[in-house]
């Protein structure tokens, strides 16, 4: 399977923040971003998220991600760096084949497919590359 067969499309850039409110206000004041979806509390991922764009013409959204609890996966990153760029999310037409493709290209599956509140129950999975980059994969909507 080659990447073209998996329908990859950049969906959003994930940014880790201590709290959604102040980060949303900053992006709004500086760049004109507005919340288009959220906030969503996802107890499975242990995060709260907002999706922002400047217009319908944006090719990708910004996802602000704040910890929902002390054991959230982003808590340690926030403690070390205060936050910032966290991941890129790609939508795919076939999540299982995309994970097999990633594994064949040396990626580690960090989290297997599971439903996500922010995507209406569509499944997401997380992969980590040899170059230490984190990517989220989300199955395409019907």
Image (tube, grey):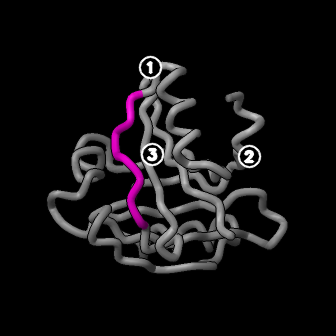
Is 115 situated above or below 101? below
Say which residue appears at 39% left-offset and 29% top-offset.
Answer: 108
Q: Position of residue 80 (x, y in %)?
A: 25, 41
Would residue 124 be found to the left or right of residue 34 on screen?
left
Crowd tier of the residue under label 2, counting other residues whose Cα lies within 10 Å: few below 14, some 14–19, many 20 or above: some
Q: Check if mark 2's residue and mark 3's residue have beta carbons within 8 Å.
A: no
Q: Quote the CA–CA distance across marks 2 and 3.
A: 23 Å
- As helix, strand or loop, the secondary structure at mark 2 comes to loop
- As helix, strand or loop, the secondary structure at mark 3 comes to strand
Say which residue appears at 51% left-offset and 67% top-offset.
Answer: 122
**What secondary structure prevails in the magenta region?**
strand
Q: Quote the CA–CA distance across marks 3 and 1.
A: 16 Å
The front one of 45 and 17 is 45
User: Which residues lie in the magenta part?
Assistant: 108-115
Crowd tier of the residue under label 3, counting other residues whose Cα lies within 10 Å: few below 14, some 14–19, many 20 or above: some
Answer whether residue 82 is magenta in the image.
no
Say which residue appears at 64% left-offset and 77% top-offset.
Answer: 34
Answer whether residue 113 is magenta in the image.
yes
Q: Which label number is shown at residue 86?
A: 3
Q: Which of disc 1 and disc 3 is earlier in sequence?
A: 3
Q: Which residue is mark 1?
A: 130
Q: Quadrant of the N terminus?
A: top right
The front one of 58 and 6 is 6
Nearer the viewer's eye, disc 2 or disc 3? 2
Q: Position of residue 76 (x, y in %)?
A: 22, 46
Q: Which label number is shown at residue 7?
A: 2
Q: Position of residue 112 (x, y in %)?
A: 37, 47
Q: Quote the CA–CA distance across marks 2 and 1.
A: 22 Å
Residue that sits furthest to the right in the current view: 57
Is 76 situated above or below 142? above
Q: Quadrant of the C terminus?
A: bottom right
Q: Position of residue 94 (x, y in %)?
A: 62, 49
């Amino acid at each position: 399977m080659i990447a073209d067969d998996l329908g990859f499309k950049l969906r959003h850039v994930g940014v880790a923040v201590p709290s959604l409110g102040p980060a949303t206000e900053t992006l709004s004041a500086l760049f004109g971003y507005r919340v288009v979806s959220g906030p969503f509390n996802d107890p499975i991922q242990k995060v709260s998220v907002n999706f922002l764009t400047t217009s319908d013409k944006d090719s990708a959204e910004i996802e602000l991600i704040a910890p929902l609890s002390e054991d959230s996966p982003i808590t340690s990153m926030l403690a070390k760096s205060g936050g910032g760029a966290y991941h890129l999310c790609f939508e795919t037409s076939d999540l299982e084949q995309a994970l097999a493709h990633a594994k064949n290209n040396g990626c580690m599956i960090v989290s297997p497919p599971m439903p996500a509140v922010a995507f209406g129950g569509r499944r997401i999975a997380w992969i980590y590359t040899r170059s230490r980059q984190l990517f989220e994969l989300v199955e395409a909507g019907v």
